[in-house]
Image: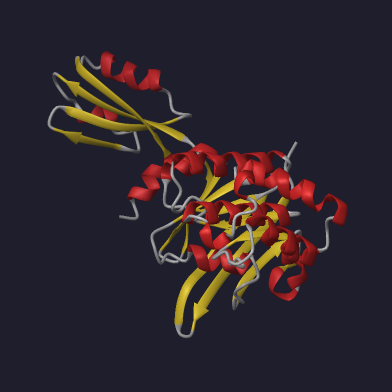
């Protein structure tokens, strides 16, 4: 059964004065998908997320949520959960900040506020610090409170800008689990990150921004890199392979999941090349594309 498309970007572009930051950006996000947004610093990741969240206007193309243009229907983003440059009232506790936010939002009945806040603080492991003033929170605690804030107010879409920034491994695991839990409920989520391991762990789908546009938009895939030392190398045998290079008598090849590893090794054996040594390394497709940004 195909999933419903929630967010669709069509030839999207954003400029600051005469400077075009993003252009011809096209992608789709479906219900329950966790999408990793990747790119170098300054690539336009935060600009794109802010446009999705209704923070930035945009001049070119369209961003539609459930078929409605975001820039002309700003009421749409009221139901988004957003973690971009979180702001809190430092003199209030974490619990008081969340309660004030939910009271202003007005979507949860007053008699259920405490229950919902405690449930979310439990997920991000801040329940023990709920009465502590936010001014006394560490950076990592503030990040997790921001995530709790975004997830509590998220009714149909979640936008997170660098949610793992400044977190230790335990904090990262908490955030990942919270994201996965929300996605299982059918919530589409997009987040930016510089950490490829974090992206590979939780994402179904990645969008890579390069030179102001989308250079890859698709599923996470695995590739296996083979480094094979041969006693006599015949390069012509490997002409049909897309991702291959040679170093002296060593052949280095990346094979996609849908390519036949058996066929690759059969070609070596059937062409009278003797394998002296094999090294393998599993790599994600995102590694390949990210290396292209350097």
Q: From this viewpoint, is residue 109 visible? A: no
Quadrant for residue 182, please give it.
top right
Q: Is residue 187 left or right of residue 48?
A: right
Q: Position of residue 264 (x, y in %)?
A: 34, 22
Q: Is residue 238 left or right of residue 95?
A: left
Front residue of 158/113: it is 113
Q: Position of residue 270 (x, y in %)?
A: 28, 14
Q: Residue at x 30, y 32 (%)?
A: 253
Q: From this viewpoint, is residue 70 visible? A: yes
Q: Is residue 197 above or below residue 19?
A: above
Q: Residue at x 12, y 31 (%)?
A: 248
- Numbered-mark total: 0
Q: Position of residue 281 (x, y in %)?
A: 33, 29
Q: Image quadrant for the N terminus?
A: top right
Front residue of 8/239: it is 8
Q: Is residue 109 left or right of residue 123?
A: right
Q: Position of residue 179 (x, y in %)?
A: 61, 44
Q: Residue at x 38, y 59 (%)?
A: 40
Q: Residue furthest bottom?
A: 17
Quadrant for residue 134, please give it.
bottom right
Front residue of 100/275: it is 100
Q: Is residue 172 above or below residue 252?
A: below
Q: How is the image coloured?
A: secondary structure
Q: Residue at x 48, y 39 (%)?
A: 170
Quadrant for residue 100, please give it.
bottom right
Q: Image quadrant for the C terminus?
A: bottom left
Q: Is residue 104 above or below residue 239?
A: below
Q: Is residue 74 above or below residue 109?
A: below
């Amino acid at each position: 059964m195909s999933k419903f498309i929630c967010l669709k970007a069509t030839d999207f572009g954003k400029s600051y004065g005469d400077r075009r930051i993003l252009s011809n950006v096209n992608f789709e996000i479906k219900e329950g998908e966790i999408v990793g947004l990747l790119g170098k610093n300054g690539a336009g990741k935060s600009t794109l997320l802010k446009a999705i969240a209704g923070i930035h206007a945009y001049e070119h193309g369209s961003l539609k949520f459930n078929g409605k243009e975001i820039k002309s229907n700003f009421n749409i983003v009221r139901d988004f959960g957003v973690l971009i440059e979180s702001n809190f009232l430092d003199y209030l506790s974490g619990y008081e900040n969340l309660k004030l936010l939910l009271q202003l939002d007005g979507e949860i009945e007053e008699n259920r506020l405490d229950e919902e806040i405690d449930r979310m603080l439990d997920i991000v492991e801040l329940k023990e610090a709920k009465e502590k003033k936010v001014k006394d929170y560490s950076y990592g605690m503030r990040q997790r409170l921001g995530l709790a804030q975004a997830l509590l107010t998220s009714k149909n879409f979640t936008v997170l800008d660098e949610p793992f920034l400044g977190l230790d491994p335990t904090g990262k695991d908490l955030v990942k689990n919270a994201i996965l839990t929300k996605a299982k409920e059918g919530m589409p989520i997009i987040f930016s990150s510089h950490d490829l391991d974090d992206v590979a762990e939780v994402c179904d789908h990645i969008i890579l921004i390069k030179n102001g546009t989308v250079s890859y938009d698709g599923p996470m895939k695995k590739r296996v890199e083979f480094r094979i030392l041969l006693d006599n190398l015949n390069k012509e045998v490997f002409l049909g392979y897309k991702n291959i290079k040679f170093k002296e008598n060593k052949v280095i090849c990346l094979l996609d999941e849908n390519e036949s590893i058996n066929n690759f090794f059969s070609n070596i054996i059937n062409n009278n090349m003797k394998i002296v040594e094999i090294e393998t390394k599993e790599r994600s497709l995102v590694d390949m594309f990210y290396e292209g940004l350097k």
